[in-house]
Amino acid sequence: MNLLTRVKKSLRHRAAHQASQPLSKLLSLTGFGRYGPGPQLKSPEPLRQAGIPYETFRFDVAGLDRFWNELQAGSPVLRHYCSLQPYWEKRSQYHYSWTQLAPLLSREEAVYVDIASTLNSPYLEVIRALAKTRNVFVQDLVFPPGINGHEIGGSAAELPLGNASVDAMTLHCSFEHFEGTADTGFIREAARVLRPGGRVCIVPLYLGEYAFTMCDPAWGYDIRREAEPVIHLFPGWGERHGRFYGVDTLKERVLDPAHAAGLTSRVIHFENILELHPTCYTHFGLVLEKPAVG
């Protein structure tokens, strides 16, 4: 990215940030959406009441610190991110994903894809440090279509990958941005491309007290109102679309399609996430698995 492009991008972001609050207030008055962030679900009780099974996970705070201290020692990139204040939220997300995928990525021939990612994703530093495989790919809409080196371009709901060709996939702070039917489409696509025994980790899985979509209208002014359950206009958020599932839409859009496609699911409640830091927002996660053969 040259200097002129960086300057244009910076000015565009600054203008959008300044327009975000008045635009949010204006659109809330027109009935386009509700002003302010929506209510994120933190308790698993609504899942229990809806008959959706879930597991409880407690972070070993001391063990989490040791994990990151060891990784930082060999990675200036991770050392930078871990120094971010007040707390780098992905410490917990990345650690949990690694605990779920470590056995799969201990083989040199294993194939791993980070969905809705970039070549600069900090999680790739974790994979490079701990995994034995070097078959590491990043997928995103911004990449050219098809497979180009370690980049996979196109929609996550239409991956240019063969059947049963992938061992592990992760989605960190990305699944909520899948608009339209791309979330359900990805679930079905994951069932197709995963090898038996393969896993997908979605962390966080954003749940709300009811189904809603969060939107910074400075970036998401063209969201189709009729396609979203409830829109919460969150000034200064900087994202165009963030889907929070209610227990009903979680079942309808994610869990039922996963089960119909032959995947098993585990909804995870991170019981002590706020012990890590009061700003932490990773209250739930989801692990999908394609059953092993035999």
Image (cartoon, grey):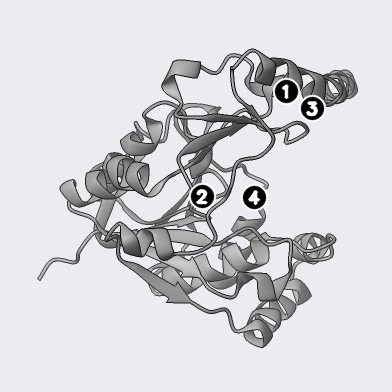
SS under mark 2? loop
Could you say which quadrant of the image residue 66 lies in? bottom right
Q: As shown in the figure, which amino acid type bears the numbered disc 1?
A: Ser
The residue wearing badge 4 is: 121
Contact (Cβ within 8 Å) of mark 1 with mark 3: no
Q: Is residue 5 above or below residue 96?
A: above
Q: CA distance from mark 3 to mark 4?
A: 17 Å
In this image, 35 relative to 150: left or right? right
Identified at 46% across, 26% down, the residue is: 228
Q: Nearer the viewer, mark 4 or mark 1?
A: 1
Q: Is residue 109 above or below residue 191?
A: below
Label ID, residue 1: 3
Give the mark nearer the N terminus: 2 vs 1. Answer: 1
- Identify which residue, 96 or 226, lies in the foreground: 226
CB atoms of marks 4 and 2 within 8 Å: no
Residue 254 visible within the image = yes
Give the CA distance from mark 4 to mark 1: 30 Å
Q: Pointer 2 and pointer 1: residues touching (CB < 8 Å)?
A: no
The alpha-carbon separation of the residues under discs 4 and 2 comes to: 20 Å
Residue that appears at 58% across and 70% down: 95
